[in-house]
Amino acid sequence: MFSRRTARIGGLVIGGDNPVAVQTMYDSQIADCDVEQVLHRMRLLKAMGCDLIRFSYVSSRDRDSFERICRARIMPVVADIHFDHRMALEAIEAGADKVRINPGNIGARWKTEEVVRCASDHGIAIRIGLNSGSLPRGYEGERKEDIMVSSALEYLSWFEGWGFDNTVVSLKSSDIETTILANEKLASQCDVPIHLGVTEAGGVVSSSIRSTYAFSRLFDRHIGDTMRVSITGSIEDEVHAGVEILRAMGMRKGGVRIVSCPRCGRHSFDSQGFLSRVENRLLAVDKDITVAIMGCQVNGPGEAKNADVAITGIGNKVFLYYQGELYKDVDEADGEEELFALIDRL
Ligand code: SF4
């Protein structure tokens, strides 16, 4: 196993001894977006722990929005390019901190070389992104992980031949074992920083479980420098899941630890509905605290004692606990703002 070299993506350095970065991919075509809303969402994602974000750069229609997003400098921005290498050149000119390409999809080798030279001139990174669903022809009969690894190593040799080394590689599959084997083999043969992902992994539950299993096996072997939990769902959930994986594995400290009851027949407070309303806001709080959201007055007070701030309720009343003590009760409609007022006081 090599010790990883580093790659610089805007102000973010990955690889080496740097912490694993969490990324997500924006869920709409930016040409059709309200850029102010995109920026607002990016600020929330950043507060939740997102380190970099990728946008599909599909056509020149995306340029204006993409340029404004890059210029806002909220976090490093990646342009995802599929077939047209001119879009990569355009995205780099517009301010991308990294482009993600699959040289096999771009066509002639000189097109990839143009992208690499342009990235080099602008001092940005490139991710070579290979998916098991779009492998090059001519390798029929070989294992998918071997095809991905040999393709990645070939592309890396092109890049190095052009004097470029600010590179990241991702080898993704919807099959967990293929993803794990591909990344293990890659890591044993080169020192390039690696982005991890299990693609098309399903909704929140299945994707989080599949990604946690794959990433934890790879992290145990010190493989993986950035990661995305690909969820058929919201990008906020992707970031939440990525941060939770790192925190559960002791690889990221701080932030809000949410304790919430699973609910049972005793519940007299809609803890599930309340949590779904406040969760993203809670996760964006930059404090190392525990917040308990409990469904009733049976176990609620007990958990509240171990939390910095807690809430439970009966009927139209909610009870707020501050540092283990009952603090006050308020109407349920005021519960959210009262909870955040207490968190502000901490
Ligand atoms: S806190 Fe109350 S509602 Fe929630 S699981 Fe425990 S007993 Fe049930």
Image (cartoon, rainbow, N blue to C red):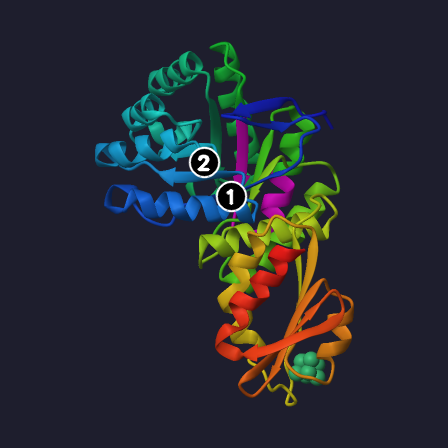
- Is 176 a magenta residue? yes
Query: Tag 2: residue type?
Result: Ile
Secondary structure beneath disc 2?
loop
Q: Residues within 10 Å of mark 2 (few under 14, many from 20)?
A: some
Tags 1 and 2 touching, CB below 8 Å: yes
How much space separates mark 1 and mark 2, taking CA atoms?
8 Å
- The residue closer to the viewer here, 230 or 96, is 96
Q: Position of residue 242 (x, y in %)?
A: 59, 49
Magenta range is 168-182
**Residue in the picture at 44% in, 14% down:** 120
Q: Earlier in the sequence, mark 1 or mark 2?
A: 1
Q: Position of residue 202 (x, y in %)?
A: 49, 60
Residue corresponding to mark 2: 74
**Residue in the picture at 41% in, 48% down:** 41
Q: Look at the image and tell me whether residue 293 can be seen.
A: no
Vertical relation: 308 (above or below) 82:
below
Secondary structure beneath disc 1?
helix
Q: Position of residue 224 (x, y in %)?
A: 64, 37
